[in-house]
Image (cartoon, coloured by chain):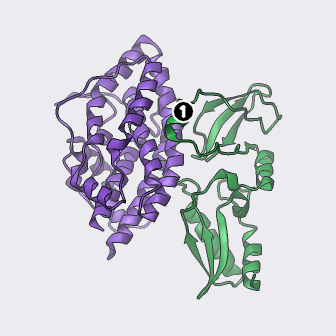
Amino acid sequence: MSANVEAAWAALEELTDPEIPVISLRELGILRDVRPAADGLEVVITPTYSGCPAMEQIEDDVRATLKRVGIAARVVTQLAPAWTTDWMTEAGKEKLRAYGIAPPHQTPPGSNVVRFISKPAKAETVPCPHCGSGHTVESSHFGSTACKALYKCLDCQEPFDYFKPY
Amino acid sequence: MSAAIDYLLHLADNALVLGQRNAEWCGHGPILEEDIALSNVSLDLIGQARLLYQLVAALKGGDCTEDKLAYFRDTHEFRNYTLLELPHHGPLSGYAQSSLDYGTTIVRNFLYSALMALLWEALEKSANADLAAIAAKSLKEVRYHLRHSRDWLVRLGDGTDESHARAQASLDHLFAYTQEFWAHSPADAAAIAAGIGVDVTTLRADWDAIVDAALNEATLQRPAVSGYVTEGKQGIHSEHLGFLLAEMQSLARAHPNGVW
């Protein structure tokens, strides 16, 4: 690994998600690669949801951060393979929980759509990030952002966000 | 290449037009959670449309951009299914007015999401690698849209007499428009021949299975449909698309190349 690539990874480590400022872009799985290119470095990022409004901010943040430490780099957005919450690191998931967002479960193994939808609706247990109780209910499939669902803990009565498996 | 462009525009226009329609609920949802849910669904759809328009713009080259495709094409150039441009209420004509009807919104989102869940899954194998990548992302999103609309379909259909009657009326109104799902346009045929597109009729049995199971659970009757098949994906639209585009495009047209 060239010194520049290492320095870039180190500089980018401080960059967090604009919406969830406790988890780094690397831990979230958005920052995919830093590699040498003919004209400097190439930083590869991938969007979470197609319409995630944070992507442009993230691209600007990456560019500004590398410029500040004097590294010439280009930001490349790559769609495939599609981002998945399974790329989130364990440390990142722990940070989410401490922040009050229940981290995502593993995505279900690649099931075909018809089977996916005809499966009996079995509510998955999402432990409350505040008190740890598994006695929680989903209030809405969609929460404060597209990537989260809204839950409520029936023990401590606190509402909370659940980062949906994607 | 033209086969790919027409096919991609059809997919993109579907997503943009329904995204714009659903966004009409922003600030007007029947309950706060649904207001947020519909806005999130719109965000996904508009995001999908952007990725597809960016791809079309790259294929067309020159000074084509995603914004030009979204804001500077007119009604007859849009290739979306007619179903998706209809307002959030039943058939009305003349000066008749109606408030937004959530049953119509839910039934439409369900019928379309059930199709797209199957179509995006099939398009993951498209010969166009960029389209396959967009399909893989969109599939993850549409599964949540399908789950959301299906849950509400059951809740409304198997709910009160009023909600049941309105959900059934919405279904009776909208179901005929789904005939367009299975009608091939010349653009479809070319895209299928090139391996870019999917022959949507191969998905019909699975779509029927998803729809019938949900309608059964929702205690709703599947309407028998026949007669005129709409041709939105060939640019022949209802009068409603013009109003939708006027609202969506007016700002960009009043301030061309504006940046904010």
- Expressed as whole percent of the image width and height from the top left, the position of residue B9 reads 32, 57
Residue drawn 63% across the image and 43% down it: A148
Chain for numbered disc 1: B
Most foreground residue, B248 or B127: B127
Where does label 1 land, which residue?
B32
Residue drawn 34% across the image and 22% down it: B222
Q: Colour of chain B?
A: purple
Give the number of marks: 1
The chain coloured green in the image: A
Q: Is residue A98 visible?
A: yes
Most foreground residue, B21 or B206: B206
- Expressed as whole percent of the image width and height from the top left, the position of residue A68 reads 69, 80
Is B107 placed above or below B45 here? above
Quarter placement of the N terminus of chain A: bottom right
For numbered disc 1, what is the local secondary structure?
helix
Q: Amino acid at mark 1?
A: Leu
Is B130 left, or right, of B244 in this rendering?
Answer: right
- Expressed as whole percent of the image width and height from the top left, the position of residue A34 reads 67, 75
Most foreground residue, B241 or B5: B5
Q: Is residue B255 visible?
A: no
Is B71 placed above or below B218 here? below
Is A49 left, or right, of B225 in this rendering?
Answer: right
